[in-house]
């Protein structure tokens, strides 16, 4: 082979090699043309130096190589975050604030630049840029309370109407560790229902109005109330072997494992009870932002009260104390499998079996107010269904931790259990809810007259120290005495 031919062949090989290299380069450059995903929260037009931002970045193909966050105010640029990942990461969550920038007021621009580790852009990688205009706001929200200080008894409910001078991320009443959300109404004011928790002393009960604005500033003021103390009933509940043998097998799936019926009862009565109550309290997240109810709440017709709200129960076995719990509802007994009317207008937010409550229905009445109906034999509603006051939602039974056929009726405000007795009383509702809301510019409907079959007890006046008895009126008691089965004499839940 001549020298010229060998040179030509070498040139061809070099050309082919260069083409291969070029192909590889082009392949790498165009292999990943997808920019990284970026999520920034909170998404707000206002912020404060102390507000914390959460930045989530991800790139499933090449991985995230770097993240740079800067703020620009006029001609000044400050770096808030500069993070390089080696090796690149598929996803990462980062937190930052503007506290170290020294910026205390005015308008600025926040810029987030995220690069992946690909060879796109001639080796610079794919880039995602987010720009967010912000205004620094360091002024906390201010309130105007439009209702007079309410009277509220221990275990009871009160309401307040107030306004806030700026848009809020959240607002409501804080009582200890409890938070009762305030709901913005059509007129721009906020309506909040809150509880005097049954286990708090008057000195411990110190409600505060609180609001967090869109910039993360928090304002709070004491909410004036007139506290009414009260004592709750104490009761001993005998636990028999017959009850344990009959009921505890129903809870073997909830409390699995080898144990005696008594051991299972103790777990059901404490651990499962708490878990069930937590489930019920979480349902407040599904509440409607406006009131759905009107007038007085209906009581189970012709029913005797078998247990009251916040009764302190000592459970006895073979004359020995084995446990203590608090009964957080009102037990009402009538004929076995009596039809149960919805206490008021609302939307069904829970239907099903729930531990000690057995078959349970929960109705949301708006603004954090909900009623629950437990130990049902059966139910005739489904989640999401709208019901009217008096609609039949099921029948009484003895499912769950119930020794006899009865209805355990409960009322919760902001997820916290309160006295049902107040909501059965048209005078209490008129004086403490409807008139107060309407005097502050609301538009609640007045109380309507009830049918005779819905005989209700009366709560003591809100400004009275008289004890609530949780007893039915004489007409309901007399009607029930003739028809209530002997097995309903003691409700266990």
Image: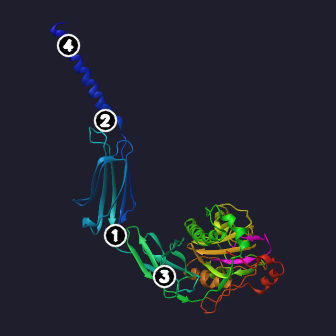
Dot 4 corresponds to which residue?
8
Q: In this view, does 440 lie to the left or right of 292?
A: left
Spatial separation of the CA atoms under disc 3 and disc 1: 27 Å
- The residue nearer to you, when weighing 326 against 122, is 326
Residue 337 is covered by the magenta coloring: yes
Circle 1 residue = 137
Tell me whether circle 3 and circle 4 mark residues in contact (CB < 8 Å). Answer: no
Circle count: 4
Q: In this view, does 394 lie above or below 18?
A: below
| Cα gap from disc 3 to disc 2, whole angstroms | 62 Å
What is the x, y in percent for residue 203?
49, 88
In the displayed structure, 343 sits above or below 69; it is below
Q: What element carries label 1?
A: loop
- Give the image location of residue 275, x and y in percent: 57, 68
Residue hosting label 3: 207
Tell which tag, 2 or 1, sits nearer the viewer. Answer: 2
Q: Position of residue 137 (x, y in %)?
A: 34, 69
Q: Find the distance from the CA under tag 4 to the CA under tag 2.
A: 31 Å
């Amino acid at each position: 082979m001549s020298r010229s031919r060998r040179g030509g062949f070498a040139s061809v090989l070099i050309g082919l090699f260069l083409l291969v290299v070029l192909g590889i380069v082009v392949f790498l450059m165009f292999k990943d043309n997808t920019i990284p995903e970026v999520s920034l929260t909170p998404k707000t037009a206002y912020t404060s130096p102390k507000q914390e931002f959460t930045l989530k970045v991800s790139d499933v193909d090449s991985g995230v190589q770097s993240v740079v966050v800067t703020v620009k105010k006029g001609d000044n640029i400050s770096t808030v975050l500069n993070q390089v990942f080696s090796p690149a990461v598929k996803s990462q969550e980062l937190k930052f604030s503007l506290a170290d920038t020294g910026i205390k007021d005015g308008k600025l621009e926040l810029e987030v630049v995220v690069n992946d580790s690909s060879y796109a852009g001639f080796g610079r990688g794919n880039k995602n840029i987010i720009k967010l205009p912000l205004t620094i706001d360091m002024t906390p929200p201010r309130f105007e309370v439009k209702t007079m200080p309410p009277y509220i008894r221990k275990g009871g409910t009160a309401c307040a109407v107030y306004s806030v001078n700026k848009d809020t991320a959240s607002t409501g009443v804080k009582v200890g560790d409890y938070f009762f959300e305030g709901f913005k109404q059509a007129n721009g004011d906020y309506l909040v229902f809150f509880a005097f928790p049954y286990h708090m002393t008057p000195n411990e009960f110190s409600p505060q109005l609180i609001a967090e604005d869109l910039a993360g500033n928090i304002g709070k003021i004491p909410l004036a109330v007139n506290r009414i103390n009260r004592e709750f009933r104490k009761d001993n509940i005998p636990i028999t072997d017959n009850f344990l043998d009959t009921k505890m097998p129903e809870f073997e799936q909830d409390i699995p494992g080898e144990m005696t019926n008594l051991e299972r009862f103790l777990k059901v009565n404490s651990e499962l009870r708490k878990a069930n109550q937590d489930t019920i309290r979480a349902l407040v997240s599904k509440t409607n932002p406006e009131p759905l109810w009107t007038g007085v709440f209906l009581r189970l017709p012709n029913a005797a009260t078998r247990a009251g709200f916040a009764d302190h129960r000592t459970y006895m076995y073979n004359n020995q104390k084995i446990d203590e719990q608090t009964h957080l509802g009102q037990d009402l007994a009538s004929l076995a499998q009596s039809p149960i009317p919805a206490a008021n207008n609302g939307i069904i937010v829970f239907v099903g079996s729930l531990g000690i409550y057995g078959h349970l229905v929960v109705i949301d009445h708006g603004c954090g107010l909900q009623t629950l109906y437990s130990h049902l034999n059966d139910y005739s509603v489904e989640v999401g269904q709208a019901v009217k006051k008096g609609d039949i939602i099921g029948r009484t039974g003895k499912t769950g931790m119930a020794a006899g056929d009865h209805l355990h009726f409960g009322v919760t405000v902001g997820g916290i259990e309160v006295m049902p007795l107040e909501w059965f009383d048209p005078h209490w509702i008129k004086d403490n809810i409807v008139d107060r809301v309407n005097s502050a510019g609301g538009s609640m409907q007045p109380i309507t007259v009830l049918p005779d079959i819905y005989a209700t007890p009366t709560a003591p006046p809100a400004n009275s120290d008289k004890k609530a008895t949780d007893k039915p009126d004489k007409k309901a008691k007399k009607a029930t005495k003739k028809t209530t089965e002997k097995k309903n004499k003691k409700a266990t839940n």
